[in-house]
Image: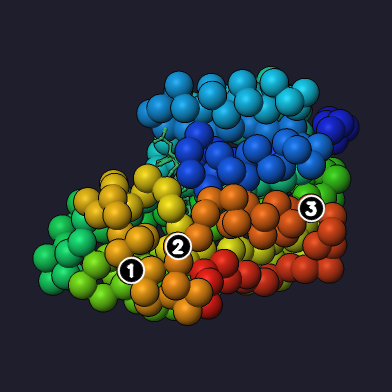
């Protein structure tokens, strides 16, 4: 049995940009070593790693597509070898697609959405539980899943598929949390609202967060750093009695 790494180690899927990168930097500033996963943009991941190292922290980047099971298995093995046993997982990697009505969504689109957003989170959490569970000789840990305000709003005429994938994440969070509650593992979720990241550009609406800000009670989009505060708190021992919880970070939306 490996000893837990010192400092504690967190794997962040999609840690190279946006909310994942903000979580990586904040977690590192609070004493976590960080495994930064990315799919395509190695340069962005390496910039996050360099920033953490420049501040005296430990980080390394790892390429893997969380929509592919073999990549996930390889990712966790590589992190084991290079950095040690994780005690934290942030299931952050997620995708949207272009605005579209349900009647026009292709099977291919739906399959990709569910594979990355839902199956990827399930499979990463499964690997994490195998390493963290006291039942398997682990030392416990904390998993934080990125959901979305869309899970409660449905995102009609935009991306009901994405909203439904995040609804699955809410249920997954509750179920897994209860399943492993006596095994030293806490599982929680965060529902960001409209956050200023590149994800909106990948859905064909780069200015979406600003355009819809008038629907937010606080009348502004949020930042990745504001979401990271909630994620890293849930990850930390400061949230030691918090499990099966969802935290909304949406300015009231
Ligand atoms: P983002 O800016 O688009 O960044 C996505 C990150 O995920 C990148 O690091 C990307 O890496 C990685 N990624 C994408 N597909 C991946 C895959 N198949 N396997 C591994 N990594 C992958 O996204 P974000 O806005 O920060 O969103 C992060 C999470 O918050 C997502 O789960 C999203 O659904 C959720 N969320 C965001 C908002 C918002 O308004 N921004 C609101 C609610 C919820 P590469 O660059 O290498 O591809």
**Point 20% across, 61% down: residue:** 99
- Find out if the beta carbon at label 2 lies less than 8 Å from the nearest ligand 1 atom: yes
Q: Nearer the viewer, residue 3 or 35?
A: 35
Please indicate whether residue 164 sits to the left or right of residue 33 in the image.
Answer: left
**Point 33% across, 68% down: residue:** 212
Q: Crowding at label 3, few (<14), some or many (≥20) Cα neighbours within 10 Å?
A: some
Q: Nearer the viewer, residue 252 or 248?
A: 252
Q: Give the image location of residue 67, x and y in percent.
A: 40, 43
Residue 173 appearing in the image: no
Q: Compared to 216, does 135 lie above or below?
A: above
User: In which quadrant of the rendered view does residue 29 lie?
Assistant: top right
**Point 69% across, 43% down: residue:** 26
Name the residue tied to disc 2.
221
Q: Does label 1 or label 3 sit earlier along the sequence?
A: 1
**Point 61% across, 64% down: residue:** 189
Q: Nearer the viewer, mark 2 or mark 3?
A: 2
Name the residue tied to disc 1.
212
> Tags 2 and 3 in contact by the CB under 8 Å rule?
no
Q: Quadrant of the N terminus?
A: top right
């Amino acid at each position: 049995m490996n000893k837990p790494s010192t400092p504690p180690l967190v794997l962040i899927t999609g840690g190279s940009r946006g909310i994942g990168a903000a979580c990586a930097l904040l977690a590192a500033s609070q004493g976590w070593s960080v495994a930064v996963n990315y799919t395509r943009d190695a340069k962005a991941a390496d910039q996050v790693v360099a920033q953490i190292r420049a501040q005296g922290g430990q980080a390394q980047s790892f390429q893997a597509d969380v929509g592919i099971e073999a990549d996930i298995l390889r990712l966790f093995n590589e992190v084991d070898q290079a950095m040690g046993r994780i005690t934290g997982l942030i299931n952050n990697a997620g995708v949207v697609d272009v605005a579209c009505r349900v009647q026009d969504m292709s099977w291919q689109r739906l399959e990709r959405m569910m594979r990355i957003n839902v199956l990827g989170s399930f499979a990463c959490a499964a690997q994490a539980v195998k390493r963290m569970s006291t039942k398997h000789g682990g030392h416990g840990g904390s998993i934080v899943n990125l959901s979305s305000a869309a899970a409660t709003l449905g995102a009609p005429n935009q991306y009901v598929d994405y909203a439904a994938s995040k609804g699955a994440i809410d249920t997954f969070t509750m179920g897994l949390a209860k399943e492993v509650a006596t095994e030293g593992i806490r599982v929680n979720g965060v529902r960001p609202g409209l956050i200023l990241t590149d994800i909106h550009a990948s859905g064909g609406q780069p200015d979406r967060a600003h355009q819809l800000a008038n629907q937010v009670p606080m009348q502004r989009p949020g930042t990745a750093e504001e979401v990271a505060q909630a994620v890293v708190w849930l990850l930390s021992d400061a949230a030691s009695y918090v499990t099966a919880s969802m935290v909304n970070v949406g300015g009231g939306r």
